[in-house]
Amino acid sequence: MTTLLRITCFILSVVAVPSCALLHDPRFERVVRVQALADPSFRGRNPRWNEELRARIEAASVYFEREFEIRFVTVNAAAWPERERIASTAGLMVKLKQDFPTQKNDGAFDLIVAFTAEPLSRYLPTGRPRADRIGDCRVGLGNYVITTVSGIFRNVPEHPDLNYDTVALIHELAHLFGAEHVQDTASIMHESFDYRSAFDMKNRSVILKNRNCPFAK
């Protein structure tokens, strides 16, 4: 029944019926509403980019649900920027904050995740996925993530593949909840997190402590 409910809600979300996704689910300690954005490079490689956005958020959500009882729900998937191509995650973050300032958030979503498929090197600062802040309860959790993709995502939500793209998104979402880089090479929060699948104990505790904190305004 749980699997059927998740698949049903995912299908409804793809056709823009958000009510199912927004229902309170007692299985999760926190439900986070996400506005997912696709830049021109992302949209240009997949005509079903809207569905892919939702599937990528869902893949990261499955991990957070299992590890932290945090559910991420895509309440809106949209094109952004409409035409401009920005070959830098730092540049995209600047524009994202300008175009979607937190002060103008009407409460329809908690955070924004923007995806780019520009051919960026993850070994250079301009090509690395990034979050706007290390969240905490005093100032608030982070509001923005820019993440890169290397291929078209085809996995069904119930069986996400923890490839580099998915781990990168998990890593950045964790920053929003207060997780920081560590020297532990086995941790997802190591700066070089390629294909890691677990958090170190310190960052795990931080995320659990902060999971019900408000998002920054």
Image (cartoon, grey):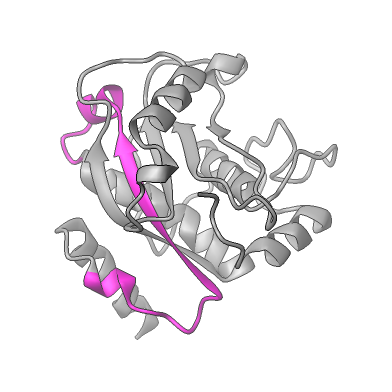
Left-right relation of 192 to 61: right
Viewer-proximal residue among 106 and 170 = 106
- The residue depicted at 56 percent of the width and 38 percent of the height is 168
User: Is any atom of residue 7 visible in this view?
Assistant: no
Q: Quadrant of residue 32?
A: bottom left
Q: Position of residue 145 (x, y in %)?
A: 49, 38
Image quadrant assignment for residue 191: top right
Q: Is residue 25 magenta?
A: yes
Magenta highlight range: 19-48
**Residue displayed at 73% across by 53% down:** 199
Q: Is residue 59 above or below residue 128?
A: below
> How many numbered circles are shown?
0
Residue at left offset 67%, top offset 62%: 210
**Residue at far front of view:** 103
Viewed as shown, does residue 135 lie left or right of 4?
Answer: right
Left or right of 14? Residue 36 is right
Q: Nearer the viewer, residue 201 or 206?
A: 206
Q: Position of residue 6 (x, y in %)?
A: 33, 72
Q: Quadrant of the N terminus?
A: bottom left
In which quarter of the view is residue 17 placed?
Answer: bottom left
* Residue 130, percent from left and from top: 56, 32
Q: Residue at x 63, y 53 (%)?
A: 177
Looking at the image, residue 195 lies above or below residue 216: above
For residue 83, say whether it is visible: yes
Q: Position of residue 52 (x, y in %)?
A: 29, 45
